[in-house]
Image: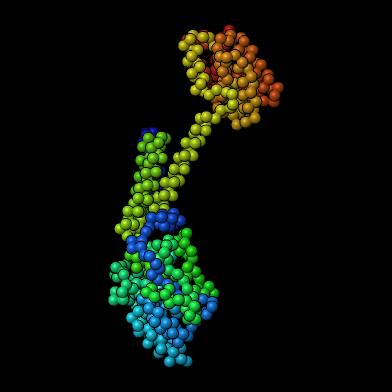
Amino acid sequence: MRSASLGMRRGALVLAAGVLAALLGALGLAAVLDDAVYRALAAPRQPLSAPPAVVLGIDTREPWPWSNVRIAELVERLRNAGVRGVALDLPLQANPGDPAGDAQLARVLRDNRVVLGVTLAPQPGRPPRAQLPPIDFADAARLGHVLLPRDRDGRIRQHLPHQLGDDGVRWPSLPLALVKPGNGGGARDWNARDRWRINYAGDVATPHTLRASGFMAGHIDVSQLQGRWVLVGVTDPSQQVRVPGPHGSPALYPVEHEARALVAVLQGDTTRPLPLAAQALLALLLAGGALAAGLVRGGRDWRMPLALCAGLVAALALSAWLLTRQLWFAPGGVVAVLVIALLAWATHVLRREVRARRRLPGLASPARLATALDAVRTAGTPHVVLRVDTTGPDAGHDRGDTCLLAGLLRERARRPGDLAVHLGAGRFAMLLPGTPPAAANRLLEEIREQAVARGIPPPGARMHACEGDACTCAGALDATTDDIAQPSP
């Protein structure tokens, strides 16, 4: 019955660890660990030698809104600079007072290398609603949505390559539309339905942000733009809020997040997270399996830390292997649970060692007393064992009384064979080989008197005498002071 109950408790502990790891991953509570692991393991599949994309930000130097004529001039200058494509993440509006300017911008947008951003407004319980640019602009250019999905913690880690609107249109993202086949792009899968995890680790391919006003004023060398993809957006903090990316990366403007996604597409680094059900099942198996392996012998030997460390390695190795196949398993929940279990095991072992080794200075341990009793019993030497226990309401817990009583016993163990022992919890013993019971009894009374003189509550004291080989001291030590036999007359 006891073994069955113990097995049930261990099974419940294993299940709880697995469920906790799955919940931490599903709820994003281990996102910090997930971001750190992804940053360490992820590497571009096609490393680039230079930034393939550049952001032109409309900031406080020449704040938004710009006139449509100004925007048309910007697009024309970019085309003349030899850029590969232009994406406008701008809220364009028609100007009834300047139809010529609207017409000029519409003509420029007919270039196959220009893409306009489409805002998708979320709707409760329904697909988002597309907010299209003016019809003349929408008909002239390709369109791509600029919806940035946020995780539970408000950070952007993923990219939506496609999003279905409430009008039934399946909108490609702005970066995906920009590098669409037929325009020299390098994207692979134009029908992807899953989200992509974006790598925000800084490298030489990280897009730079330049001032659009500086480019228009001729302060930027066209060589910084030639042959690159250009995304134009608002980078004015008074009009646009920076949104944080994964932990360890800086907060970026929306157009800068789009640029990171564009680089990921060009590098072929479009990692898809596993479905939530698969992630939860893997977390349950990894965390629960490691703990179950460690509890084979009760978790009290080297098997527990070895199993927990093996579980950590397995979780990280699985994530690394899946990344090579453009899949992502978030191991943060498993790592957190196994590290907590490892710390709990180490704390338990440390406390057990401290309890086992904690004894007052100058006093022997119970193990040494057992060895000494075996020696005197084997030699047939008569001996006496004294039991002295602290008393009072705080017996065994008053450190001051315990230390004073230990000092008295230490002073009285004067002969080479005498042994003063701390049994724990305010309990002491003295082994006095070759001491007559009458002398031992006088010694016991002196100890009690000196204890009272030093302000210690009168200790419980008993004596047990043995003739030699017929030794019953072990039973006397296990008994309470009231049960220890009195010395023979």
Q: Residue 393, image x and y in percent?
A: 63, 30
The residue that appears at 52% across and 18% down in the rendered structure is: 476
Q: Residue 124 is drawn in which quadrant?
A: bottom left
Quadrant of the image containing the N terminus: top left
Whether 409 is drawn above or below 183: the answer is above
Q: Which residue lies furthest to the top in this view?
A: 489
**What is the tally of numbered marks visible in this picture?**
0
The residue that appears at 57% across and 14% down in the rendered structure is: 416
Q: Residue 119 is drawn in which quadrant?
A: bottom left
Whether 25 is drawn above or below 229: the answer is above
Q: Residue 384, image x and y in percent?
A: 56, 13
The residue that appears at 63% across and 17% down in the rendered structure is: 412
Q: Residue 290 is drawn in which quadrant?
A: top left
Q: Which residue is more in the foreground, 446 or 70?
A: 70
Q: Residue 320, image x and y in percent?
A: 35, 53
Q: Residue furthest right?
A: 453
Q: Which residue is more in the foreground, 295 or 147?
A: 147
- How are the colours assigned in the image? rainbow
Residue 446 is left or right of residue 112, and the answer is: right
Q: Which residue is more in the foreground, 205 or 38?
A: 205
Q: Can residue 268 be seen in this view?
A: yes
Whether 258 is drawn above or below 32: the answer is below
Residue 284 is left or right of residue 242, and the answer is: left
Whether 467 is drawn above or below 86: the answer is above
Q: Is residue 482 visible?
A: no
Q: Residue 82, image x and y in percent?
A: 37, 78
Quadrant of the image containing the C terminus: top right
The residue that appears at 45% across and 87% down in the rendered structure is: 69
